Image (cartoon, helix red, strand yellow):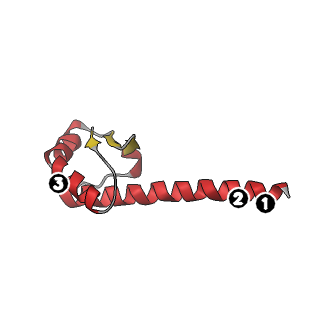
Amino acid sequence: MDYFKITDLLSKFSKIISDSDSKKEIIISVLLKHTKKNISKENFKIDKNILVINMSPLVKNEIFMHKLDILKDLESVGMNIKDIR
């Protein structure tokens, strides 16, 4: 009986992780579209609807130059990202 409860719990975590991965894939494709830079999943995180970029200043500046367009594209696909830092 306990086995089924554990598998239900683990499946919930699996869905959360896959949702996070799919969100990151969408963000990567939008960033690639606007900056022509390949950015990996490890180079950014989403914290309280804010996209936090952990890359070189050169890449960050490229992203910030297209910030409004990136935010509009993310909003158009249903992502609730309010800012990029």
Seen at 83% across and 54% down, the residue is: 2
Q: Residue tagged by mark 1?
A: 4
Labels 1 and 3: the sequence-earlier one:
1
Q: Amino acid at mark 2?
A: Asp
Secondary structure under tag 2 reads helix
Secondary structure under tag 1 reads helix
Q: Residue tagged by mark 3?
A: 69
Q: Are marks 1 and 3 in contact (CB under 8 Å)?
A: no
| Quadrant of residue 8 within the rendered picture | bottom right
| Quadrant of residue 64 within the rendered picture | top left
Q: Are marks 1 and 2 in contact (CB under 8 Å)?
A: yes
How far apart are the two marked residues, 2 and 3, measured between alpha carbons? Answer: 40 Å
Q: Nearer the viewer, residue 65 or 82?
A: 82
Q: Amino acid at mark 3?
A: Asp
Q: Residue tagged by mark 2?
A: 8
How far apart are the two marked residues, 1 and 2, measured between alpha carbons? Answer: 6 Å
